[in-house]
Amino acid sequence: MQKMATHIDFIKDITISNMQWKLKVRVVRMWEVPDRFNPGTIFSIELVLQDEKGDRISASIGKSVLHLFKTQITELGLYNMANFIVCHNKEKFNTTKHRLRLTFTQRTT
């Protein structure tokens, strides 16, 4: 995630058919999910992101990219972000009402 961007999209406009979104979001909740097969290690970091209109979406930082973002993102921090994956929210327990969720990659800024 970075601190500046030009054109900004809104969470309510996100669709799965486009992957070129640029969001300005606040991290309103952030927590670590432990790895159930490897106690003492983190499986992922889960986030609830909110834009200036108050819309929210879930996001995940998976184990393979934790080292890129773990120390860069803080709860209540404000960020511009791009280059993430948009997928259907099929989690058993949803933290937002949004039908989609975001996944961080090595290219996420």
Image (cartoon, rainbow, N blue to C red):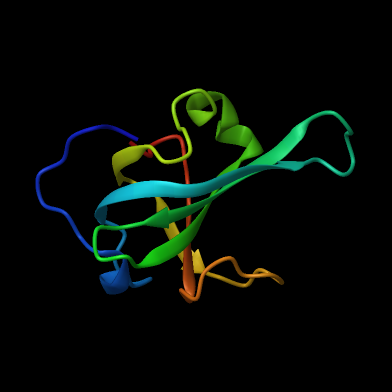
Q: Which image quarter: residue 70?
A: top right
Q: How many marks?
A: 0
Q: Quadrant of the N terminus?
A: top left
Q: Residue at x 30, y 72 (%)?
A: 12
**Front-most of 30 and 107?**
30
Residue lying at the far left of the rendered structure: 6
Residue drawn at (33%, 72%) of the image? 15
For residue 14, side relative to residue 68 (left or right): left
Which part of the image, by quadrant, shows the C terminus? top left
Residue ID at (10%, 52%) = 7
Relative to residue 84, is residue 53 depicted above or below?
below
| Residue 2 in which image quadrant | top left
In the rendered image, residue 91, in percent from the top left (x then y), is placed at 66, 68
User: Picture coordinates of residue 25 (x, y %)?
Assistant: 32, 50
Above or below residue 78? Residue 89 is below
The residue at 31%/40% (across/down) is 78
Q: Where on the picture, by quarter, is residue 95?
A: bottom right
Nearest the camera: 68 or 76?
76
Residue 103, x across and y down, in percent: 49, 51
Q: Is residue 84 left or right of residue 46?
A: left
Measured from the top left, where is residue 64 in percent x and y?
Answer: 61, 34
